[in-house]
Image: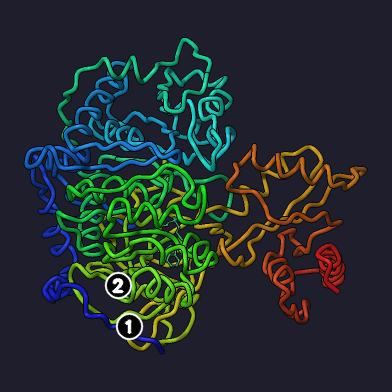
Amino acid sequence: MDFYDIGLGNNDAKTRTLANQDGVKFWESQAKNLFWSEQWHTALEWNPPFAKWFVGGKTNASYNALDVTVRKNPDKKAILWEGEDGSQRVLTYQDLLSQVSKLANALKKLGVKKGDRVTVYLPMVPELIVSLLACARIGAIHTVIFSGFSAQSIRDRVVDSKSSVIITADGGRRRGTIIKLKDVVDDAIADLDFVKNVIILEHVGNRVTYTARDRKWGEFVDSMESSCDAEMLDSAHPLYILYTSGTTGKPKGVLHGTGGYLTHVFATFKWIFDICDSDVYFCTADIGWVTGHSYVVYGPLMHGATQVMYEGALDYPNSARMWEIIARYRVTILYTTPTALRMFMKSGDDIPNSNDLTSLRLLGTVGEPINPQVWKWYFKTIGKEKCPIIDTWWQTETGAAMISPLPGIETIPLKPGSATRPVPGVCISIVDNAGKKVSPGSKGYLVVENPWPGMLLTLWGDDEKYKAVYWSKYKNMYYAGDYAKMDNDGYIWMLGRADDVLKVAGHRLGTAEIESGFVSHGMVAESAVCGIPHEVKGESIIAFLVLKDGVTATQQLKEDLIRHIRKTVGSVATPDQLFFVKKLPKTRSGKIMRRLLKAIAQDEKIGDVSTLEDEASVDEVKSALAELQYALGKP
Ligand code: WTA
């Protein structure tokens, strides 16, 4: 077993001691690091599975993210922005506060009130951060949609959240082309009357058509007053909805609150990144995903940090881009994904070696399991064996990091491929199907045993689904949907999803939403999608489709179907491989036997199907499998 003990990090044993003594009291002590206009009277109200943290307390996320720093140091640089085309912008905390106030006033003018939803569909530009904080400032609930999602996906989310206002741009830049965001939004909401207004940022100079409900950011927002008081809100007031994929049906709206969420984000940002005033932080995540919410927007800004924000592909125009950015801005902390690292690793060591990476002191990773060899490459080639690798495990639902090394408070030896131990105040176990703890080294399901401050409040508009998805497998334990094991030292090793959630290039997608995307095409009768290991992306999508009677399978149809998926779900859901088959392996009750699909796609031995699923008609399954193998070109 490899151990890496580079002795970096602070040694502050009392944080863990306090947390172990009394978790709730411990989180209360952490909450005191935020600004509150009124103190809470009850630290935690726990009506399983619904938690309310810091009840009676009043605060505001945008105040904590901006005003707190502006009062001390208004000229502190908040964002060092770089566009894919090389353009640069620098925004101070005061600049951000003025822009946020203008947009908050603009939203009020459009009639947006506390609790109303605002959808945000923007590229990685400072105005994306401004949009989130402007909503938070007036108590509106932001719901960001990643710009790789299609019109249909936007429509589904806007309908579910009933957003009255959408904020978008004339376009965004990626890989040298312009993504026409406003056109996509127009498509998505053409017949949605409850969307009263669309605010459009003119970012790339793309010509768009304006309708009566459209407002130009440059005119409408810029003409507003540049001050706006932050509305102090109940601690449990919803801060945002973020749609994320699950096992069944359409993406669900994970709802996060204010005081508890901010406390968890604030504390973990400090513990994980040991942030200090002189740091230059760079998180490569898009704000369309939870990492961007917690560790691009709220975490760094609440700490008054300076960060690099980049719009575009990290390997554009070539694979030196990310390293050049790090050298140009003297980045000290990098937080990125295993997918990005695998991609750069493939281009060899010469490229990173020819850039000055000496400013780096801490290297983070998130979103998917990091292979030990990639971990070691990150440690040696990028960090020159001086920077700890911080592998952080968490989920959209958990709000902030749950398992991670914490250089801000402790120094422990690292093991490549393990996210180490749960953060203080979070109690994680690995259990079997019956909820009993498994012995060290054994694979089981990861559960969280106590409520924690960053936990989701519920699923938007669907408390029953919230209970069913996360709290029905085990009594009073949160079911994360991940396999994991714990070793003898208490280190946790993540072993991938235990359900039908995919992680493709770090992006979370559900097989169900891609399958319904295919079936919505008039020529497809049935579809089954699964993920198979991919050298760079971690996982890639493979789809098996049964066509309707009389439809001929052609190359042209394949291409149409790929276009169709990009249109219905989005470019993120593009399958790498697509096969036409006559039938799918199913149980007698009609459930697709995904495990077999996956096994066959990965070339694993299937064994005797009759012992695997007694419910299935063995002959049917065998012939379906033979067909799949034939389609895949396997003997
Ligand atoms: C996976 C991303 C291994 C996991 C913040 C989880 C990880 C899902 C790690 C949540 C990690 C995240 N090691 N697996 N360090 N981090 N995952 O909601 O399967 O996009 O359940 O949140 O990503 O994905 P989500």
* Residue at image coords 49%, 62%: 344
Amino acid type, callout 1: Tyr
Q: Ligand 1 near label 1 (Cβ, under 8 Å)? A: no
Would residue 570 be found to the left or right of residue 490 on screen?
Answer: right
Give x and y (percent) for residue 128.
36, 35
Give the residue at mark 2: 388
Can you say whether 327 is above or below 236 in the image? below
Would residue 319 be found to the left or right of residue 99 on screen?
Answer: right
Which of disc 2 and disc 1 is earlier in sequence? 1
Which sits in the foreground, 441 or 506?
A: 506
Colour setup of the view = rainbow
Disc on res. 4 = 1
- Quadrant where the N terminus sits is bottom left
Give x and y (percent) for residue 229.
15, 27
* Residue at image coords 41%, 67%: 353
Query: Image quadrant of ligand 1?
Result: bottom left
SS class, disc 2: loop
Q: Marks 1 and 2: CB-CB under 8 Å?
A: yes
Q: Quadrant of residue 266?
A: bottom left
Give x and y (percent) for residue 551.
89, 43
**How far is disc 1 from disc 2 in space, using C-alphas?**
9 Å
Disc on res. 342 = none
Amino acid type, callout 2: Pro
Give x and y (percent) for residue 58.
14, 40
Report whether residue 479 is seen: no
Which sits in the foreground, 455 or 406?
A: 406
